[in-house]
Amino acid sequence: MQPVPIPRHHAPTGRTARLRLPATPMWSTLLIPGNWQILLEPVDPGDNGGNDVRAWVVPDPVLIRHSDGVGGVTRRRVRDPDTGRVHFVADPSKVLASWREQGAIEIPLDYEVTAHGVTHSQYILRYQTAAGLHHCWAYERPIPGPGRTRIDVDHRARCVLFASWAADYMGGVHPHVLTRLRAIDERARAACRAQADRNAVALQRLQVVERRMRAMGWLEHDDGEIRPCIGSVERTGDPSGLGAVPADFRAYLATLSPAQRARLLSSPAAGAAPTPQRIETPPSADAADDDGAVTL
């Protein structure tokens, strides 16, 4: 097991602060065909018809944390080739296989993301901190500071990433999805309006719901006009190119594991942009040695 290198721009020196972030586990991202949400991207109202947010209809993913004993995740033994010592690592393979059998789609780790002006070859980044390894989304950028580390979120990159998943793996947004989301927002608006005059939390939620409905074109602005502001993606950001294949073949690809899909669709890459730390896929259980430990 090789030591994890600390990126130069995050290595603590006399002039740079250490990343003060908790250790967080790696995760796998699953898309469920019926799970959708509306994300809001802050925008300039002057350039977007009076809307201060842009609405994006995107999948609502399920995250499977790689923590043994949590959510059915087990553990297995791996052997360090340098020391010969055996370590236990989380093994989510059985949980992921169960989700895939029920129609879930697993997002491959090598999904290109551009955030904060930097292109990352993976949508999950890993940082070395004093507490251990910290995993975060590629659109989240840790900024060291005195006493604490601030997380800067690229909201547009987040929306584009999730919208790309919808185009690549789910065939885009279907009309019945919009009908269901509108019904949910209308019920939420009616419930909040009934309590807004005596409940500050309901009033705050009402404002959020109405901003979202105006951006979707489901509610008039103060001047009585409908001016939707909805985001969309024109082409896929998926390095596998799943958005460019027919729907029936895309459905077949969704039944494959990330490794099988990569072997089927792989093509020579033109130099991926560096990430804070490359996350390597753990060896499979087929690589077990005589005592059941997997050699890294």
Image: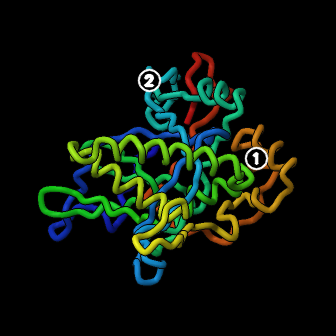
- To which residue does mark 2 refer? 70
**Sequence-first tag of 2 and 1:** 2
Looking at the image, how many numbered discs can be counted on the residues?
Answer: 2
- To which residue does mark 1 refer? 261
Q: Amino acid at mark 1?
A: Arg
Quadrant where the C terminus lies? top right
Q: Residue at x 50, y 38 (%)?
A: 63
Q: In the rendered image, which quarter is residue 34 located in? A: top right
The answer to whether residue 157 shows anywhere in this view is no
**Could you say which is closer to the camera, residue 41 or residue 187?**
187
In-image side of 141 versus 19 (left or right)? right
Please determine whether, in this image, residue 217 is positioned above or below residue 132.
below
Mark 2 vs mark 1, CA separation in Å: 27 Å
Residue 87's label in the rendered image is none
Q: Residue furthest top?
A: 291
Q: Secondary structure at mark 2?
A: loop
Q: Residue furthest left?
A: 147
Q: Could you say where residue 90 lies in the image, as x and y percent from the top left?
A: 49, 28
Q: Residue at x 37, y 55 (%)?
A: 208
**Could you say which is closer to the camera, residue 289 or residue 16?**
16
Q: Could you say where residue 253 lies in the image, as x and y percent from the top left?
A: 79, 45
Q: Residue furthest bottom?
A: 46
